[in-house]
Image (cartoon, rainbow, N blue to C red):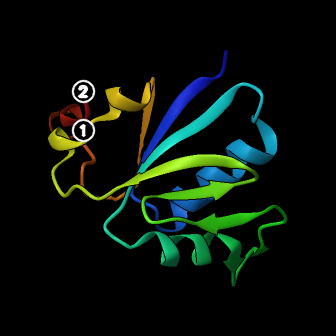
Amino acid sequence: MATKIGINGFGRIGRLTLKAINQCQGDKLEVAAINDLTDTKTNAHLLKWDSTYGPYPGEVKATEDSIIVDGKKVKVLSERDPANIPWQDYGVDIVIESTGLFTDGTKAVAHR
């Protein structure tokens, strides 16, 4: 069974994290949820069309509340406060903090 990953912040680092997981560790890791304040359509577009690293080679689609990446549904949440993100509802084992805002233990612990 794959370890489930949550990504908080879907900017450059968050998108590269998802790409690396899907392309290199897809059998061991699974991105279950993303928390980002941007809408799913924009997030999907930015994931698919990277001006620095080139287009994502797989399929990327947006729905109202998710991004479908290579046929896998990734729930997209939109919470400002990490304490309000329901990671447990998506079975998340590990959270990647990539907003640049919660950079020390006292702030990042809110992801529990």
The residue furthest front is 64
Residue projecting furthest to the bottom: 51
Check the image and name the residue furthest to the top. 1
Between marks 2 and 1 in the image, the one whose residue lies nearer the viewer: 2
The local crowd at label 1, few if under 14, some if 14 to 19, many if 20 or more residues have their Cα within 10 Å, is some
Q: In this view, does 104 lie to the left or right of 34?
A: left
Write down the quadrant of residue 58 in the picture: bottom right
Q: Looking at the figure, which quarter contains the C terminus?
A: top left
Q: Is residue 85 left or right of residue 29?
A: left
Label placed on residue 112? 2
Which residue is label 1 attached to?
A: 108
Q: Is mark 1 on a helix, strand or loop?
A: helix
Q: Distance between the residues labelled 2 and 1?
A: 8 Å
Q: Which three-letter amino acid code belongs to the residue tagged 2?
A: Arg
Say the numbered circle drawn on residue 13.
none
Q: Is residue 60 above or below residue 68?
A: below
- Estimate how packed mark 2 is, as few (under 14), some (14 to 19) or many (20 or more) residues with alpha carbons within 10 Å: some
